[in-house]
Amino acid sequence: MSRNVPQFKEKTGSNASLKGTLASVLLVGAFIVVSWFGIFFLFLSRS
């Protein structure tokens, strides 16, 4: 028995721009790094 699996076709002719995705990922990554260092220095100052 074969199931109907949707086939995702790549867009031809024009590539999707991923600049917004890259910017979002970099912003979230920067937020995580800044938060981690902030919490780390808070920990150091209290101990």
Image (cartoon, rainbow, N blue to C red):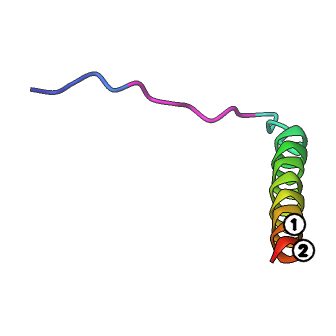
| Magenta stretch contains residue 7 | yes
| Magenta stretch contains residue 43 | no
- The C terminus - image quarter: bottom right
Q: Residue at x 90, y 46 (%)?
A: 23
- Packing grade of label 2 (10 A; few <14, some 14-19, many >=20) is few
- The N terminus - image quarter: top left
Task: Name the disc covering residue 42, or none.
Answer: 1
Q: How many marks?
A: 2
- What type is the residue that disc 2 sits on? Ser
Q: Are marks 1 and 2 in contact (CB under 8 Å)?
A: yes
In the picture shown, does residue 14 fall above or below 25? above
- Magenta highlight: main SS: loop
- Give the residue at mark 2: 45
Q: In the image, is 2 to the left or to the right of 5? A: left
- Packing grade of label 1 (10 A; few <14, some 14-19, many >=20) is few
Q: In the image, is 8 to the left or to the right of 20? A: left
Q: In the image, is 5 to the left or to the right of 40? A: left
User: What kind of element bears circle 2?
Assistant: helix
Tell me which corner region of the image, top left, top right, bottom left or bottom right, holds residue 9.
Answer: top right
What range is drawn magenta here? Answer: 6-12
Which residue occupies the foreground of this view, 15 or 31?
31
In the picture shown, does residue 46 fall above or below 11? below
